[in-house]
Amino acid sequence: MKKFFVLLSCIFSITIAGIMFSQPKVQAAEKTYTIGTDVTFPPFVYANSNNKYVGIDMELIRAIAKEEGFKADIKPIGFNAAVQSLSSGQIDGVIAGMTITDERRQKFDFSTPYYQSGIVMAVAPKSKITSLKDLKGKRVAIKTGTSGADYANSIKDRYGFKTVTFDDSDNVYNDVKNGNSAACFDDSAVLNYGVKTGLGLKIVTKPTNTGKYGFAVQKGKNQELLSKFNQGLEKLKKNGKYDQIIEKYTGSAATSSKKKENKQKDADGHTFVGLLKQNKDALLEGVWETIELTVVSIICATVFGVLIGLLGVIPNKFSQGFSTTVIYIFRGLPLLVLALFIYNGVPSLTGSKIPAFIAGIITLTLNEGAYTAAFVKGGIEAVDTGQMEAARSLGLPFGKAMRRVILPQGLKIMVPSFINQFIITLKDTSILSIIGILELTQTGKIIIARNLEGFRIWTIIAVIYLVIITLLTLLSKWVERRIKD
Amino acid sequence: MKHLKVDVTDLNKNFGDNHVLKGIDFKVANNEVVVLIGPSGSGKSTLLRCLNRLEVPTSGKVVIDGNDISDKKTDIDKARENIGMVFQHFNLFNNLTVGENVELAPTELGKSSKEEAAQAAKKLLKTVGLEDKYNAMPYSLSGGQKQRVAIARALAMNPDIMLFDEPTSALDPEMVGDVLAVMKDLAKNGMTMVVVTHEMGFAKEVADRVVFMADGKVMEEGSPDAIFDNPQNERTKSFLDKVINV
Ligand SMILES: Nc1ncnc2c1ncn2[C@@H]1O[C@H](COP(=O)(O)OP(=O)(O)O)[C@@H](O)[C@H]1O
Ligand SMILES: [Mg+2]
């Protein structure tokens, strides 16, 4: 039995080690900083039709990196996730149209401001709402963690409206457009840009609560990066590059060409075929990431689960208690909480970063592994106790009896549960979009952030999931038949 | 007394508050066939299962062939190799063929090579009249056939002693004879046996000694003739009245 466990643990550690080492090594020559940013916040950050991240923030950080000789590894993980990841030290800096506030200063150190904006209110084109007073009893859409949200929350009691919170700007705008919400609050630069490029909303208030955008690092950390940013920004302002960038994204030339582009895209972007063509590469990458996550997680979770399950049936109080506890904890925690805890929480405690992919694998391994352990335990316990007694009576040690007699019978009982768990694992990878892994769901979110084609893109994503699940099911059934024979 | 195969002294077994075996002394000599009888719940199975440590005694001493089974330090797997056990519900390994059932322990424990084990298995299956079932799966066998395979499986380890726990109780009546015949053969060939059974005919014919248990105690023991024809204990009398008169 011991040998069996040693073997299992070896496979497990090798798999984990393999993942760790397969992560790209950081080059020593140029220092690489991981910079978190939003998924979509045009004109500051958004993906263009080639799924390349562009916008004022993106061009600034890239230009500054070039000036100052460092590498910026841009992670478009969403505003909220970026801010959280920065607090926990998972990333080195955030540039995401973030307004410098006193509250944020407590956790972050900000660069010299690179842009000045203010909050405005936007409503649907046909809306009769023209001022804050008209919002009484209405619903207002805001985006989590933004200064637009802070502003809305600070005045909602005075003006008697309710707020509804979304993670992405496009969901905010959509909610207003389709009439669920009466209005939204956002930065004037963003909304101005949106309105000019055909967002389909109108701005009805003057900018208030003007704020300054800054690049942020964790308080007291990465000061070198911060001063590089400030120096670089200074140089760009002097050599005229800064003005070029701003003009490029907010000047009338930019917005009208973008408007044309939007119209053009509208023409072929409203069909499934058109959307598939436009986003083929992004979708394929997302599918691949999802498959990678699924396969690695299934392997790790199965090894982990079988191990914990077996610990639960060997006749030793300590190991049984351990198994029960592990199952109880990791089956009890919502996957979302577990993912955020491992990705953001653990680095805050230990001070060392975990790549999102690894955090994702660990999350799924623990959660799916706990479910696996539970049915492995159940499957083994479902084998008639007489089988074990007969094997032990012949002088077979526990491990041999387990391996030759109990497990083969237990496995047969477990096969349907395994297949079920594999499918659940595949589906659960979508939850990892919360920590910014660019798998299929996150890819969908980003594409929609750009083209606002929610219905069609989610349909495409749903069909892709169903296709993968069908393939996985067929594969599992094939394996099941082979085991049965 | 002759060389003792089984030497149980002051054996007690509790299941929680349930005091099931109350100070049992139980000896079996070499080549002796002992039949254990007694009402249901009297502790016969528990006593039998204490002999190969399927149940761990609460107190007392269980010595098999000079090996103290009740001592935690004893290598129980090693000891069990010499103690064959046959269960009421056969417990054939459902995932293995009849042949594999018989060969598993000898090969896994390095007692014999695959070929030797296969040969031995075929020979054993022949002695229990099932040589044609070598490749069959357990589910395709009748109860009587299953039990005979189970006996062959236990014999494959060449045990010095065989324990039977109601080996015919789960069988249709027409199957009982075949199994008992195999057991009689074993007894004739000098196997030391402890048999829990309600087959009084078998006890009369084969047993060297009959032990009557009730309420976790040995109430009476003696030769079959003494126990069946002239029981001394009231409990023995009323038990025999019941089983023999039905
Ligand atoms: N594993 C067990 N757990 C709890 N009680 C048991 C267990 N095995 C047997 N007993 C109890 O021990 C007593 C004797 O059972 P057993 O030895 O099976 O009797 P017999 O074989 O003579 O019918 C019964 O009261 C039974 O309920
Ligand atoms: Mg019994």
Image (cartoon, coloured by chain):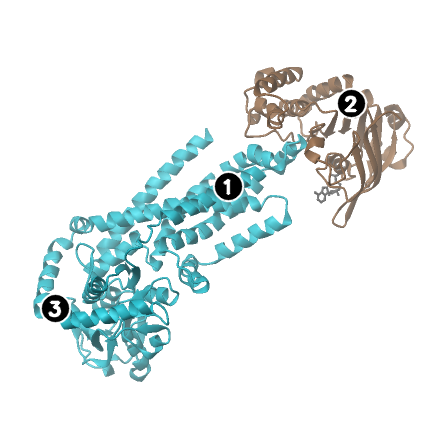
Chain colours: A cyan, B brown
Pointer 3 residue Cβ closer than 8 Å to ligand 1:
no
**Which quadrant is home to the N terminus of chain B?**
top right
C-alpha gap between disc 1 and disc 3: 59 Å
- Identified at 71% across, 25% down, the residue is B159
Which residue lies under the disc numbered 1?
Answer: A8
- Disc number for residue B202: 2
Q: Indicate which label's residue lies in the foreground, 1 or 2.
A: 1
Vertical side of B66 occupied by A184: above or below? below
Q: Quadrant of residue B236?
A: top right
Secondary structure under the numbered disc 2 in the rendered image: helix
Q: Subunit of mark 1?
A: A
Q: Quadrant of residue A40?
A: bottom left
Q: Are marks 2 and 3 in contact (CB under 8 Å)?
A: no
Say which of B58 and A344 sits in front: A344
Secondary structure under the numbered disc 3 in the rendered image: helix
Task: Please indicate, yes or no, whether residue A113 appears anywhere in the rendered image.
Answer: yes
Secondary structure under the numbered disc 1 in the rendered image: helix
Q: Amino acid at mark 3?
A: Gln
Q: Is residue B232 left or right of residue A139?
A: right
Q: Indicate which label's residue lies in the foreground, 2 or 3.
A: 3
Q: Amino acid at mark 1?
A: Leu
Instruction: Give the quadrant of ligand 2.
Output: top right
Which residue lies under the disc numbered 3?
Answer: A244
Q: Subunit of mark 2?
A: B
Q: Amino acid at mark 2?
A: Phe
Q: Indicate which label's residue lies in the foreground, 1 or 3.
A: 3
